Amino acid sequence: MSNIESKQFSFLKGINSEIQRGITLIRSHPSVNEILEVRLNTEDNSVDAVVAVQLGLPNKWMAEGKSPNGVSAIEAVTFSFPQSFPIHAPIVKLRADFDRSLAHVNPGSPEEAVLPCIYDGDINELLLFQGLLAIVDKYLPENVTDVGSLRERAKEFGCNKNFERAFSFLQQRLKWLDSKNATFPIAVILCVRRPFHLIGESSEIELVPYILEVGAPQLLAKDDKTPVWSAVHKYAITPQLLQTFSGERQLPENQDIVLIGCGSLGSKIAIHMARSGIAPSIVVDHKNLSPHNAARHALLPEAINKDSTWFGSKARATALAIKGLGQDSSYFDADVTQAVHDSKLLKKLFPRKAWAVINTTASLTVREALAAIEAKKLPLRVIETSLFAEGKVGLMTIEGPGRNPNSVDLIAQAYELIRVSEKLRNAVFVAEDSTSYHVTGQGCGSRTMIISDARISMLAAPMATGISKMLAKGLPSTSGRILLGAVDEDDIGLSWTPVDVPPFHVVPINDDSSWTVRISEPAHQKILKDCANYPNVETGGILVGRIFQTQQAFVVTDVLPAPENSQRSRFEFVLGTSGNMLEKYLSSCNGALYCLGTWHSHLTDSGASNQDLQTAKKIANSRTLPSVLLIRTPVKYYAVSASIF
């Protein structure tokens, strides 16, 4: 039986109530036989509670009172409570002569109490999260303290030959040098082959690292008594490590991501992705950092010479930050809009094997330039991110397969979604421009949206999350997508609404023109429904949306019904003018969407008549903006315009 004798205990004066409760709680644990002793340490006012813990040895060892290596059936375990308990957890100690060859024993002097490693993490956090019993419930016990014991350990691991060979080689190299009594640290890593893969690893090799101080010409100042310290093995920063801790899947090889825009929003999305191990492999921005960017940029100015160093390329700075996170990223200080007419630049910026392009610039020019590049020249789908209304609204659009719908289709459709939502409409379509000019130095300034770093992060984080989700599961397979994020009235909550956008119906104008009409699916369905309602006469209505000059496209987002005084017959449709429906529509979106022209039906599959051509000329002469006349037949669409050449 154990030689531990039962002793009565009582709480001494000076032991606070929190520690008393902790000791009482330990006593209630089913593996605790009794509290053997409670003592107050006068040096630091810590309180030691010596506890008899029944280990549950096998019956044979239980009968003998201990295991072959000397572990008793009932062990005395000391819980040393600091006065700061329960903010700080007690230290658990075993007797000094406890077998140090067991696993999970922290290194220490043979004369001192054994300190077992009882929890993989911060024990103070464990205490506050699960309580004291979580600490009492588990304790598992390295006794390498000098070169002599390190040699023995290497022998036990079967590493002694290589260990001695390495030390001999090092001794030979250092004997011709003189460190003048100074020492320097070296690492010794024993590579131990285990019978199975280590837990959480794909290898059966365990790395057991140590640190010791060596000198020259004498390698070991105290020979085998030279102190040795256990070290901790940490992984390097790699994409795999970051992906593991972020819950991300590893990207296939050559799956490049191109990010355009390394400003406030773009840098945050780039760094979020980099920290997840899925950093953009190409970053593009032709602008330089400026001191005012420090207010909202994901990167931080250096503490030393911050005012003189915060002027370089945004793209280069972002690429260097990504490199610091163990990933390679090429940077280009290029104007993306030049790629429309520069095939060499296009190939350099957008590798054909890349996964997608992320446009974070909020630039109308960049958006239209990318949309103007044919899908066969730029097959990569574009994901666009932007903020509106001083950060009250976030928008992310994802182009569809074959880049239909493309970014300009989607921004126009997003305006329509915003228009029909009272909350979004009141935030976005206001009379005042949310961007304004702000001085950044004498004679210098920037047109920007005033918005806090926290607000940008609030919207950038879910955007980055959405992108990583698509990386894992794939881009939308049959459509484009719009995601609208709206910040709640309390400025804390945030809700996102996804809307899948089917491909647009593309109709060439005047047959030989490069211009097209791009009709959204909702508008197309309204036209079909109106034709079905009037199968025996021509009918029609008003086209609304936006014109994109660079892409040479009329993008139709909606169709307004014909006014009440419109005239329908088998051979003609005359659009009425009664009411103020169009004015109401324009005011509901502050002119972001507007009239593009008209549409009408033909009862047979016929193109534009002479009367249609005359009507197109009449409309063109009455408007400053280009206009289009769309014809729907039972089979297809035709489009004519006298405004384009």
Image (cartoon, grey):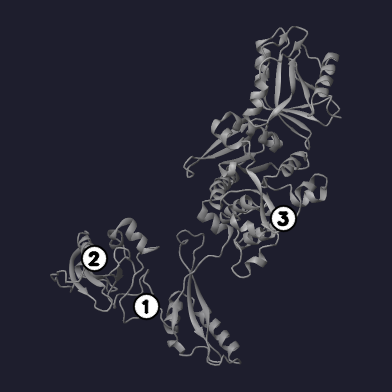
Question: How many other residues sit within 10 Å of disc 2, few (<14), some (14-19) or many (≥20)?
Answer: many
Residue topped by disc 2: 19
Q: Which tag, 1 or 3, sits closer to the chain's start?
A: 1
Q: What's the residue type where badge 2 is placed?
A: Ile
Q: Quadrant of residue 323?
A: bottom right
Residue 257 visible in the snapshot: no
Number of numbered tags placed on the structure image: 3
Q: What is the C-alpha distance between the residues marked 3 and 2?
A: 61 Å
Identify the residue at horizontal 48%, vertical 81% (top origin): 212
| Residue 621, percent from left and from top | 83, 23
Q: What's the residue type where badge 3 is placed?
A: Lys
Q: Quadrant of residue 119?
A: bottom left
Q: Quadrant of residue 544?
A: top right
Q: Which tag, 3 or 2, sits closer to the chain's start?
A: 2
Q: What's the residue type where badge 1 is placed?
A: Gly
Residue topped by disc 1: 108
